[in-house]
Image: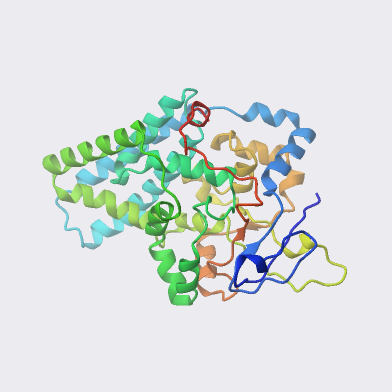
Amino acid sequence: MQRTVVLSSRASNESEKPTGPEKTTYTPADDWLWTYQEEPHRTRRQLIIKAHPEVTKLCGPEPLTKYTVAFVVALQFAMALMLRNTPMFSWKFLLTAYVIGGTANQNLFLAIHEISHNLAFKKPTANRLLAIFANLPIGIPYSASFRPYHLTHHKSLGVEGLDVDLPTAVEAVFLNSVLGKAFFTTFQIFFYALRPMVIYRLPFSWIHLLNIIVQVVVDIILIRWAGWNTLWYFLWSSFLAGSLHPCAGHFIAEHYVFEALHEPSPRSSPSDQLPVETYSYYGILNLVTYNVGLHNEHHDFPAIPWTRLWKLREIAAEFYDPLPQHKSWTHVIWQFIWDPKVSLWSRVKRDQQTSKGRKVGAGWTKEELGQ
């Protein structure tokens, strides 16, 4: 598969960046990996459909999702009630919040991710309401905002100013050290929560209001009925789910570039200089994370639900076998912190003016709300 890639070194102003595919230079460790090619997933999707048209039959809602969400929400409420009289800073409280709560809330983060693609029900409204329900043990309303930001991530992968999954330059500069990266991985849940609002803000809609009202009402009822410890359990579970938790490794594993870049040789092509920008993981933690590890597969076919991604991987194995993959999310966190060649700069970026990305949810059209 042919790819046209351009890498650029840090430029002091926009005019110094390459303006066409004829200019390719080595990218130093203190800048993004700039490319002027289209994101690879659309191209690979078209090639896979051409080679295996049957994969389109895998698309559509998965009924099992709503039952899984109900079970995990019930589990978290049960655990919160069991710990309502346990001191918050006791080993029992924190260990439970890490092992059970962190895993459960990471599962709910990814349930909301799955639901954002309308993969639980056929009707968009039913998916929005299920996402609000899945949000309850997280403690803070965010499901309504997550969806348009995440769909924009798919439509505008790596596009500066649109893809809020990309770190900002401020993050990359100030956290470009072992201690900085350790701080980022420990508190990355806050970066992912606050960064979108810094990059661009969404219009406030009825679903945002409903998300806030339902969450606040449930939080208040829980506190008045069972005490503050129940809410603290939810909040600690959410924090630990996005901190130094094995399942949290997927945040870094998905799109940070871990492959070493090499100086161009006379016989090399531009595509030889830029590794794949999305990585998959096929390990056991997929069992509790809606198979989010199959991330190349997910970006290639966002309309295929979590239960059928393995089937896609099996059908189109010749497309996925050659791609680099991670063996362990825990190792990903360790390598990200300690490897000087990997940092917040290790992301592929596209210029907004030359990309084909677009913002989803900006106008809340019927088309966007129904995706």
Examine the image and state in which quarter residue 5 appears: bottom right
Residue at the location (71% across, 64% down)? 18
Q: Residue furthest top?
A: 123
- Number of labels in the image equals 0
Residue at the location (65% across, 49% down)? 355
Relative to 357, 231 lies left or right: left
Relative image position of residue 79 (x, y in whole percent):
26, 45
Relative image position of residue 272 (x, y in whole percent):
78, 63
Examine the image and state in which quarter residue 183 appears: bottom left
Relative to 250, 5 lies left or right: right
Relative to 205, 309 lies left or right: right
Q: Residue furthest front?
A: 15
Q: Residue furthest right?
A: 267
Does residue 201 appear in this view? yes
Tell me how the rendering is colored: rainbow
Does residue 291 appear in this view? no
- In the picture shown, does residue 223 fall above or below 119? below
Residue at the location (67% across, 29% down)? 56
Relative to 107, 295 lies left or right: right
- In the picture shown, does residue 54 fall above or below 345? above
Of 244 and 195, which appears nearest the observer? 195
Relative image position of residue 324 (x, y in whole percent):
68, 57
- In the picture shown, does residue 79 fall above or below 366? below
Relative image position of residue 184 (x, y in whole percent):
43, 66
- In the picture shown, does residue 198 fall above or below 139? below
Examine the image and state in which quarter residue 34 appears: bottom right
Residue at the location (63% across, 29% down)? 58
Of 320 and 156, which appears nearest the observer? 156
